[in-house]
Image (cartoon, rainbow, N blue to C red):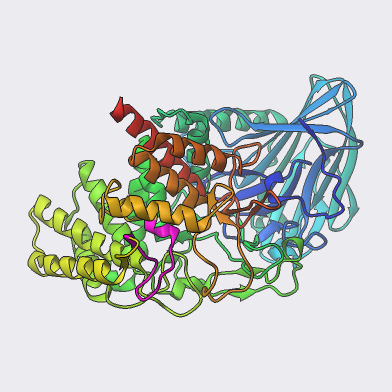
Amino acid sequence: MSAVDKSDNPYPPISDYGFIGDCHSSALISRSGSIDWCCMPRIDSRSCFGRLLDWKKGGNCQVVPAGPYEVSRRYIENTLVLETTFRREGSEVRLIDCFPMKPGGQHHPYQQILRIVEGVEGNMELLFEVSPRFDYGDVKPWIRQRGERHFVAIGGSDGLLISGDIPLKMKHRHQLTCSYTAEAGKRLHLSIEYMKPEDLDEGLFEVPGVTELDGRLEDTIGWWNEWSAQGKIESPYSEHVRLSAIVLKGLSNAPTGAIAAAATTSLPESPGGSRNWDYRFTWIRDSAFTLRSLWELGYDKEADGFRRFIERSAAGSAEELQILFGVGGERRLHEVELRELEGYRGAKPVRIGNAASGQVQLDVYGELLDLAWRWHMLGYSPDDDYWEFLVGLVNDASKLWKNPDRGIWEMRGRPRHFVHSKAMCWSALNRGIMLAKDVGRDAPVEKWEENLEEIRSAIEQKGYDPKRGIFLQAFGGQDLDSALLLMPTAGFVDYKDERMVRTTDAIRQELEEDGLLRRYSADGDGLKGREGVFLACSFWLVECLARQTRFDDAHEVFRRALKTGNDLGLFAEEFDPKSGEMLGNFPQGLTHLSLIAAAVAIAGMEKKET
């Protein structure tokens, strides 16, 4: 329980936000009950509430006590339904927020935010405000009353149906407000449904009644409980693992199987700086990591859905592969700066789209072949079309591994010969050879085996420092990189290999800050400003330490990393140890999936060693 933040800076810290989603859309809700970020009908749609990126222009939807209050919050167990509790002078009110889920299916969502206020004790005056702003705050929708308790908001190609039993009034054409007293034992409802403006204009909609809204809440809790029950979680950190899996599911796109890297764009990796990117897309690498983690927990359906998504998005051809796609499979993700927006706490520019879609990042070949191999090990061998696609990927890896690339961190400086990228090309060939032999398929295996040895030789000669006995970030340099912690996952080197143990220790020595890891030295990445520690890297370190049976160290780093999450157990991309604040887009899928992998590694290795 804590008091509301009284900071002069209007932008709350990133940790103030909770996340809700329905495998289509997403929203962030602050501790003060304000929806400051919401994109509908998809996670990468233009925002309809976007105060997160411009406090004055972006728009929001708030339910908050009229006077001073204390607040606590949680997710209803095993769900992505957020419950915020406000308390003041013997009065208590509960605010429940969710995107309703339809029983038995998720491909045709309600496209609705549901906010329910429950009076728990005493009476409490609440302030309600609904200020939608479409297209990242550029469009103030025209709000009109269409019934006793429902309104339509239309602007350009976007529309909202706003309804419920809260006595909202139009403050002006672009905002609804009211003050109302919540009473113990009674419920209030606010429904915000995304609709086509022409349907709203022509009255082609039904206004859900409060009984229907209560039913949708119960259906949503049931849907999430049913999904969560599929997971097999055995870990001393099971609560964190379960929530992380739910967050990853919330970041997914049900119709395609894609998984977005995060729910936001342009939350800065460096305070007030220019390291601001749009992460509402699906990276092959991140999604492959995600599915590996979900597999460990028994969520096979999500894994196969993404595998099929990549094959479709690449048009079944390795030549059409790129490192990231829109969650619907879109390929054109041109990066645009919205110069008119202030940016979170003044961090400019605000970007939509991502220029990294045109980069060469060679590690994706290894990720996709590893995905195919794991799918095969579950008993699902590649059919003729999928095999043709995989052979194309391995052939490309065998040709392109000699080239420099931008690496796992999407460096905006010059391309380099990153060791991790080379190791992942090696992994693509290795998995391809294993698959070909295991399923008896035709493939140029002898040629692949020759290339396999060439890559290993190159890495061990040019990507290894014999004096220190450690692997290096790139050929021709002496820097280290936390991505090297993934080399055992690729199968290139065993976790307990002395070279890997020494590399792990060297990374801790050179890149550790306050018990957590930076991903690399910021020098030479082509950008200004110093970023924070990268949380996924810290969880990668945990997995390495656990698989090297250094359990005390593994638990110590894991517990330190857990402290960077907020009170709900959500994690951003990075963390600033000096200020104690989150940095980067939020919630970050890569952080949550790396947490799962680390927790699984600790539990599995400790069980194995006993």
Residue 315 visible in the displayed image: no
Q: Please, is residue 322 above or below residue 203 in the view?
A: below
Q: Is residue 350 left or right of residue 166?
A: left
Whether the magenta-drawn stretch holds residue 13 is answered as no
Dividing the picture into quadrants, the one containing residue 29 is top right
Quarter of the C terminus within the rendering:
top left
Residue 349 or residue 499, whichever sits in front: 499
Rendered location of residue 456, percent (x, y): 21, 65
Left/right of residue 386 with respect to residue 473 in the rendered view: left
In terms of image quadrants, where is residue 99?
A: top right
- Is residue 548 shown left or right of residue 410? left
Taking 595 as reference, is 52 above or below it? below
Q: Is residue 377 visible?
A: yes
Q: Residue at x 62, y 61 (%)?
A: 269
Q: Which residues are magenta?
A: 469-484
Q: Up-down: is 377 above or below 424?
A: above
Q: Measuring 26% from the left and 47% from the top, which residue is drawn there?
A: 374
Q: Position of residue 13 (x, y in %)?
A: 73, 50
